[in-house]
Image (spheres, grey):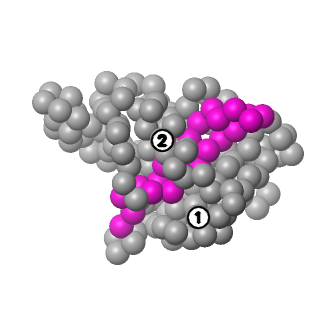
């Protein structure tokens, strides 16, 4: 998973949104972004080895995605996301965030694990194009089930390929 970090050692940002510079993707600051995301997800304390991309408006971090539990042998990676504004969830932004796992790492599947009672996060996952794959009993403690949602490479290509190159 080092390719993103090595490419952006000093940090890198890229305006998105069809020339609208109000949103910017920022890479190369994994530790800071991952800590921010963890602070906004009650059941997370540490992601372990990971990469992260933040979404800025101006100089304010409004959302972040952490890519962790990368399994190159199986072509999978887990995503954890947090946001303080829904403004980040534009199609161009989502396409930019999903380029890293699908195009750079070459995974076949990204997935999330979300507490079943976090309705807002489950709605965001659905908006992004993830599909429910399973419900795991007591994944987040006794009686608190987890919903596994996923996107496969063909879904990414169908939903976002046209957003990447124009």
Position of residue 141 measured from the top left corner of the image (x, y, whole percent): 17, 32
Predominant secondary structure, magenta span: strand
Q: Quadrant of residue 102?
A: bottom right
Q: CA distance from mark 1 to mark 2?
A: 16 Å
In what quadrant of the picture does the C terminus appear?
bottom right
The residue beneath circle 1 is 5
147 vs 87, left or right, is left
Q: Nearer the viewer, residue 142 or 61?
A: 61
Q: Give the structural element (helix, strand or loop) at label 2.
A: helix
The residue beneath circle 2 is 35
51 in the magenta segment = yes
Seen in the picture, residue 100 relative to 38 is either above or below; the reply is below
Seen in the picture, residue 157 relative to 7 is either above or below; the reply is above
Number of numbered discs present?
2
Q: Give the structural element (helix, strand or loop) at label 1.
A: helix
Magenta stretch: give its range.
Answer: 50-71
Seen in the picture, residue 51 relative to 58 is either above or below; the reply is below
Position of residue 63 measured from the top left corner of the image (x, y, whole percent): 59, 36
| Residue 166 visible in the picture | yes
Q: Residue at x 72, y 56 (%)?
A: 12
Q: Nearer the viewer, residue 135 or 23?
A: 23
Looking at marks 1 and 2 on the same chain, the residue that comes earlier in the sequence is marked by 1
Tell me whether circle 1 and circle 2 mark residues in contact (CB < 8 Å): no
Position of residue 94 measured from the top left corner of the image (x, y, whole percent): 62, 46
- Label 2, residues with CA under 10 Å away: few <14, some 14-19, many ≥20: some
Q: Residue furthest bottom?
A: 73
- Label 1, residues with CA under 10 Å away: few <14, some 14-19, many ≥20: some
55 vs 64, left or right, is right
């Amino acid at each position: 998973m080092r390719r993103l970090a090595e490419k952006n050692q000093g940090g890198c940002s890229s305006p998105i949104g069809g020339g609208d510079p109000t949103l910017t993707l920022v890479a190369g600051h994994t530790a800071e972004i991952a800590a921010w995301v963890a602070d906004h997800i009650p059941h997370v304390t540490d992601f372990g080895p990971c990469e992260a991309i933040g979404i800025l408006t101006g100089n304010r971090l409004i959302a972040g995605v952490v890519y962790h539990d990368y399994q190159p042998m199986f072509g999978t990676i887990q995503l954890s996301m947090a946001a303080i504004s829904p403004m980040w969830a534009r199609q161009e932004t989502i396409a930019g965030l999903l380029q890293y796992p699908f195009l750079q790492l070459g995974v076949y599947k990204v997935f999330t694990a979300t507490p079943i009672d976090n309705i807002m996060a489950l709605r965001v996952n659905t908006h992004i194009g993830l599909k429910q794959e399973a419900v795991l009993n007591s994944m987040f403690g006794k009686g608190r089930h987890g919903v596994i949602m996923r996107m496969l490479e063909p879904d990414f290509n169908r939903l976002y390929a046209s957003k990447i190159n124009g």
